[in-house]
Image: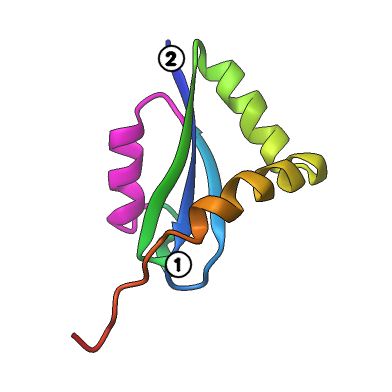
Amino acid sequence: MEGIIYILYSLKDKRTYVGSTDNLERRFFEHKAGLVKSTKNRLPVKLIYFEKFSSIDQARKREHYYKSCAGRKKLKLILDKIIKNVRVPRLDS
């Protein structure tokens, strides 16, 4: 079974969330619908990055790495370029 790690960016608090799944479309829908405890108070979120792996175990290992101190530093380098291009919608329009 294929595994995927993904990174969400909260437009509310400007923070990221790292997760893993075997079905990115379903999991992203769950996040957007407020069904995930970790992100329901941080909506709206945007999917800004994902990586595919040949197994869910490999994806979970990468997720664990990105949540470690060394992984966060590496991830910051990747995401700094991506986050600069994320547009925050205006609330008054």
- Tell whether label 1 touches label 2 (CB within 8 Å): no
Q: Which residues are magenta?
A: 21-35
Q: Amino acid at mark 2?
A: Glu
Residue depicted at 50% across the width and 61% down the height: 84
Relative to 85, does residue 25 appear above or below in the rendering? above
Majority secondary structure in the magenta region? helix
**Quadrant of the image occupied by residue 29:** top left
Which residue is identified by label 1? 42
Q: Quick one: 49 or 67, which is closer to the camera?
A: 49
Relative to 30, does residue 24 appear above or below in the rendering? above
Residue depicted at 61% across the width and 44% down the height: 78
Q: Residue furthest right?
A: 70
Residue depicted at 42% across the width and 68% down the height: 11
Whole-percent x and y of residue 56?
52, 18
Apparent side of residue 7 relative to residue 31 in the rendered image (left or right):
right
Apparent side of residue 78 relative to residue 31 in the rendered image (left or right):
right
Element carrying mark 2: loop
Element carrying mark 1: helix
Which residue is identified by label 2? 2
Disc nearer the start of the sequence (2/1): 2
**Magenta segment includes 71:** no
